[in-house]
């Protein structure tokens, strides 16, 4: 990708006709914003779009698109690499409502100050519509609205706790903060395709002699749901419980088959719960690191210890691999799990750890909240959220 030194004195394309006037058949990126298109550095859309343009990408701006359907997101045709989306300079809920929850008569960032040009929670709505228009394209969600909602959060207007905007919107990446540096890095990686040519050979070696498969609560829930058993019965039948020496947290570990030493679900050279396999299995040969402060995820490649084959014909990317293994779909829950576990570990450490006489009963109560008090008939995340909310005041009393 060559960096352009040319300075344009015209607006970026806002329509198919503008693209064709520049001789472009396809855009590289579409930048979507909740404000009117004002090409000035006080507007985030202008900064991000011009930054991408300076890197040599073909960029179009979709300002305040219609949100009743996804047709406006097809205005330019399908972009080559994806969408960058922001809710606007001001949080859309703040733009629409006063602190007393009274609808505002004007929207200062819309043409003529006219209200109603953007939806409530515009960042989430725009992301869903982009995904509806082109489900296979990456959506990078950034700006104020996304940054403030990157974790599960209390929503003032609904008076309830909502999950991370990453889970709620379906965005592939959340860009936190100003975003100028990560925008360039993300664009370069998307353009390069991040090749990842590992292909599972189906040898089953990664399932043999496994004694280290620690499950998250979501892992156990998925396995229990696959088997049609409550999580506690599933754990009693196939797992053992330990206390992690560093975090002091209770941990549920798959118990190897006593005869073979293999994963208990590995039979006849195949995984019997493949659709509900734990995260560590789905990731292999990748490792995953989650920053407990920002919930940012990084992936690193471990040395494949099995008979993996590389496909020279099919060009595959890291995102393809993550999508195929359903890792992207569960990323929001895994990130929240890491954040909560870090907070609980800190709580136990501050209370004196194993030296605290109430450590064991507190740990048992944590185990219930993280692993066992779940109905497989209901979705995991609302139960996880309710369990952990109820857990904190109990720990305050117990410790």
Image (tube, grey):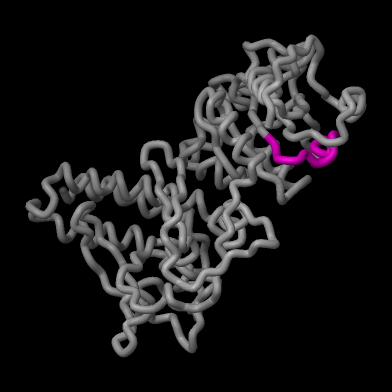
Question: Residue 46, image x and y in percent?
Answer: 68, 18
Report which quarter residue 139 is drawn in: top right
Counting labels gives: 0
> Would you say 57 lies left or right of 89 here?
right
Q: Is residue 155 above or below residue 197?
A: above
Q: Is residue 289 above or below residue 97?
A: below
Q: Quadrant of the N terminus?
A: top right
Q: Kindly tell me whether residue 216 is visible in this rendering.
A: yes
> Does the magenta segment cover residue 79?
yes
> Does the magenta segment cover residue 238?
no
Q: Give, as a single range, the part of the protein colored magenta.
A: 70-83
Report which quarter residue 85 is drawn in: top right
Q: Kindly identify the residue that appears in the image at 35 percent across and 47 percent down.
A: 340
Q: Kindly tell me whether residue 375 is visible in this rendering.
A: no
Question: Residue 91, image x and y in percent?
Answer: 59, 24
Question: Residue 267, image x and y in percent?
Answer: 46, 86
Q: Kindly identify the residue that appears in the image at 67 percent across and 56 percent down.
A: 315
Q: Is residue 54 above or below residue 321?
A: above
Q: Kindly identify the residue that appears in the image at 17 percent across and 46 percent down.
A: 349
Q: Kindly identify the residue that appears in the image at 45 percent across and 67 percent down.
A: 281
> Would you say 364 lies left or right of 259 here?
left
146 or 266, which is in the foreground?
Answer: 266
Report which quarter residue 365 is drawn in: bottom left
161 or 132, which is in the foreground?
Answer: 132
> Would you say 321 lies left or right of 333 here?
right
């Amino acid at each position: 990708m060559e960096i352009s030194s040319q300075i344009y004195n015209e607006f970026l394309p806002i329509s198919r006709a503008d693209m064709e006037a520049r001789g472009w058949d396809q855009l590289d990126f579409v930048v979507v914003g909740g404000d009117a298109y004002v090409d000035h550095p006080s507007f985030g859309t202008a900064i991000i779009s011009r930054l991408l343009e300076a890197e040599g990408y073909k960029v179009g701006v979709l300002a305040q698109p219609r949100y009743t359907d996804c047709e406006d997101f097809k205005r330019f045709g399908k972009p080559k690499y994806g969408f960058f989306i922001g809710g606007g300079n001001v949080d859309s809920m703040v733009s629409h409502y006063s602190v007393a929850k009274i609808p505002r008569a004007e929207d200062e960032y819309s043409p003529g100050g006219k209200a109603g040009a953007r939806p409530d929670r515009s960042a989430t709505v725009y992301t869903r519509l982009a995904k509806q228009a082109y489900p296979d394209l990456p959506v990078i969600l950034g700006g104020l609205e996304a940054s403030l909602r990157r974790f599960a959060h209390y929503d003032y207007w609904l008076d309830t706790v909502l999950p991370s905007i990453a889970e709620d919107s379906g965005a592939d990446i959340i860009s936190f903060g100003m975003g100028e540096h990560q925008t360039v890095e993300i664009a370069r990686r998307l353009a390069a395709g991040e090749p990842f040519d590992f292909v599972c050979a189906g040898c089953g070696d990664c399932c043999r002699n496994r004694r280290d498969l620690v499950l998250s609560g979501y892992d156990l829930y998925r396995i229990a749901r696959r088997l049609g058993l409550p999580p506690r019965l599933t754990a009693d039948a196939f797992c053992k419980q330990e206390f992690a020496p560093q975090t002091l947290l209770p941990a549920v570990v798959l118990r190897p088959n006593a005869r073979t030493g293999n994963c208990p679900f590995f039979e006849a050279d195949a995984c019997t719960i493949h659709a509900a396999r734990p995260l560590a299995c789905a990731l292999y040969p990748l490792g995953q690191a989650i920053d407990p402060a920002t919930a940012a995820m990084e992936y690193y490649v471990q040395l494949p210890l099995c008979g993996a084959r590389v496909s020279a014909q099919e060009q595959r990317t890291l995102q393809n691999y993550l999508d195929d293994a359903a890792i992207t779909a569960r990323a929001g829950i895994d990130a929240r799990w890491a954040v909560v576990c870090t907070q609980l570990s800190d709580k136990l450490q501050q209370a004196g750890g194993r030296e605290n006489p109430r450590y064991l009963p507190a740990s048992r109560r944590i185990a219930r909240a993280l692993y066992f008090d779940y109905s497989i008939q209901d979705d995991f995340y609302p139960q996880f959220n309710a369990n952990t909310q109820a857990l904190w005041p109990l720990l305050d009393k117990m410790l």
